[in-house]
Amino acid sequence: MVALAHKSPAGRIDVQQLTIRLGQGAQAFTAVDQLDFSVEAGEFVCILGPSGCGKSTLLGALAGHLEPAEGILRVDAQAVHGPSPDRGMVFQQHTLLPWRSVLDNVAFGLKMQGLGKAERRTQANEFLRLVGLEDFAQRWPNQLSGGMQQRAEIARVLINRPRLLLMDEPFGALDAQTRARMQELLLEIWGRIRTTVVFVTHDIDEALFLADRILVMSPRPGRFIEDLRLDFPRPRHSSLLTSPEFVHLKRHCLALLHHQDGRELPRLTPLGLPSDDFPPLRIAL
Ligand SMILES: Nc1ncnc2c1ncn2[C@@H]1O[C@H](COP(=O)(O)OP(=O)(O)O)[C@@H](O)[C@H]1O
Ligand SMILES: [Mg+2]
């Protein structure tokens, strides 16, 4: 039996005073501003925010693709400097190599580690089974549907047993039904491989359906304006999307995304009670 996950517990994130600036000269601007947060090993966190608020920038810094202007990022107490297969990234568009079979694409990370061909294939088949693609190992990437390509991409990243699975709107290009299926599949996979997931989205339903915790970002420069912990039971099913608790939290997230700087932040009230009876929400990060 192939071990699917990193030695646990692994994947704790500690970020202090993280500021990232982008652009050159007069065009330079602050993309994310003084973020402070921690993520427990094995937690599933969604970063929710409007388009352009700096979500991809933050994820790029966690991946090691971007150097912060200020602050420090640590994963399992080690400072992040540069990319590593230990922090696997899945984008909206897959990065499978078109001239390699699905199997060889998934096995590629192990080739980089110097493993022999037979071992690479055994492990790649195991990860293809994990994402439900065992019957498509010999296909070319362009013979797969969009959803299947993203499944292969997830297998390609997970075969490196990353401490962090970083996902940047990974299902954003898929149709609604495929997207819903992929969300359920991702939770199923995560149930088996309890790696830390940081999942970026601007879709409230997606964040509420997936996460243990949602960090909501303000418009640019991105700052966290809410740290929401969700205790919807798992496994989660589509019926959750119409439950009163879900709709209640969705309304709160909508208010946060529409919040204008300088105004008092919308506060989360217990379900069924009028909002004015409660003091402003304290944001503990
Ligand atoms: N390399 C770059 N140079 C200049 N501006 C950039 C660069 N990358 C992103 N931006 C800008 O920085 C802001 C934050 O971008 P991004 O992190 O991609 O936002 P999000 O993922 O939340 O939509 C956006 O306004 C975007 O246009
Ligand atoms: Mg983005």
Image (tube, rainbow, N blue to C red):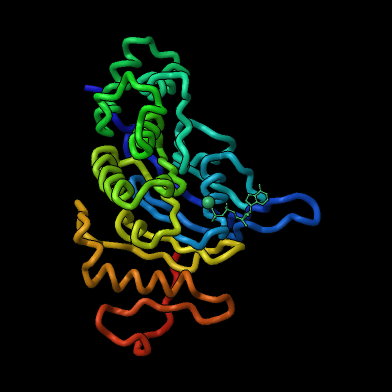
User: On the rendered image, what quadrant is the C terminus found in?
Assistant: bottom left
Give the quarter of the image for residue 27: bottom right
Residue at image point 24% right, 38% down: 192
Q: Residue 144: where, in percent of width, then height?
A: 35, 31
Q: Residue 41: where, in percent of width, then height?
A: 36, 46
Give the quarter of the image for residue 266: bottom left
> 276 or 23, which lies in front?
23
Q: Residue 22: where, in percent of width, then height?
A: 68, 51
Q: Is residue 36 above or below residue 11?
A: below
**28 relative position to 45: left or right:** right
Residue at image point 38% right, 53% down: 45
Q: Report how many numbered discs are placed on residues in the image.
A: 0
**271 relative position to 54: left or right:** left
The answer to whether one can see residue 12 in this image is no
Q: Residue 174: where, in percent of width, then height?
A: 38, 46
> 270 or 250, which lies in front?
250
The answer to whether one can see residue 155 in this image is yes
Q: Is residue 36 above or below residue 145?
A: below
Q: Is residue 18 above or below residue 123?
A: below
